[in-house]
């Protein structure tokens, strides 16, 4: 569209919407695509224990599992959401009840839980996390650590209403 300029009148004529493709002759509204929900990962639910208690720390600590929980679509942080965490650690196997615990997200949708050092199981150092509270669809994650010497592992949830 030769000579096309974006000015107050153009914005008013388009209903205040931003437009894309101005130089191409196409005028289409620019829309923010919604934040897609996190899919469950293969193997994420291995050794899951429904109702693991909310704890201050799992075992002796020394390793931090962290992450965020947001709502699908708008990405709003979700406070007060229960996240269960378990792993194969220096203090137990991922199937052991004492290797499981849960925590709640803070006002900004963030969570942190200290636990023993994660060690490789089946050749990979990894953790397991679950959102399973019911308000949103259940999601199981199984993030793999870059190195078994890492002292933290982060996992992020984007939840779809149930």
Image: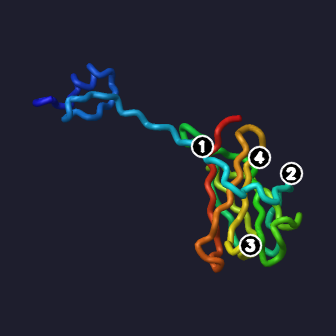
Residue 118: in sight, yes or no? no
Callout 3 secondary element: loop
Which residue is situated farthest in the left direction here?
A: 3
| Disc on the earlier residue, 4 or 3 | 3
* Closest to the observer, 46 or 110: 46
| Disc on the earlier residue, 1 or 3 | 1
Distance from the alpha carbon under mark 3 to that under mark 2: 24 Å
Q: Residue at x 77, y 71 (%)?
A: 88
Distance from the alpha carbon under mark 4 to that under mark 1: 14 Å
| Disc on the earlier residue, 1 or 2 | 1
Residue 72 percent across, percent down from the top left: 59, 40
- Residue under label 3: 121
Quarter of the image where one finds residue 135: top right
Circle nearer the viewer, 4 or 3:
3
Residue 16: in sight, yes or no? yes
Q: Is residue 52 above or below residue 89?
A: above
Residue 28 falls left or right of residue 1: right
- Residue under label 1: 37
The 10 Å Cα crowd at callout 4, few under 14, some 14 to 19, many 20 or more, is: some
| Disc on the earlier residue, 4 or 1 | 1
Distance from the alpha carbon under mark 1 to that under mark 2: 23 Å
- Residue under label 2: 51
Residue 9 percent across, percent down from the top left: 21, 22
Distance from the alpha carbon under mark 4 to that under mark 3: 24 Å
For the C terminus, the image quarter is top right
Q: Is residue 37 above or below residue 49?
A: above
The 10 Å Cα crowd at callout 1, few under 14, some 14 to 19, many 20 or more, is: some
Distance from the alpha carbon under mark 1 to that under mark 3: 28 Å
* Closest to the observer, 121 or 150: 121
Residue 15 falls left or right of residue 52: left
Query: What number is the disc on residue 132?
Result: 4
């Amino acid at each position: 569209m030769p000579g096309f300029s974006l000015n107050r009148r153009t914005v008013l004529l388009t209903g205040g919407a931003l437009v894309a493709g101005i130089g191409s002759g196409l005028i289409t509204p620019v829309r923010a695509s919604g934040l897609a929900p996190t899919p469950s990962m293969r193997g994420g639910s291995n050794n899951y224990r429904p109702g693991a208690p909310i704890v201050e720390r799992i075992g002796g600590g020394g390793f931090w599992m962290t992450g965020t929980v947001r709502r699908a679509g708008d990405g709003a942080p979700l406070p007060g959401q229960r996240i269960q965490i378990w792993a194969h650690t220096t203090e137990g196997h991922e199937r052991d009840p004492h290797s499981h615990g849960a925590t709640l997200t803070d006002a900004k949708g963030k969570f942190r839980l200290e636990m023993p050092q994660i060690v490789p199981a089946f050749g990979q150092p990894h953790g397991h996390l679950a959102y399973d509270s019911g308000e949103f669809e259940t999601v199981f994650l199984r993030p793999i650590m870059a190195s078994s010497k890492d002292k933290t592992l982060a996992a992020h949830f984007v939840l779809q209403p149930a």
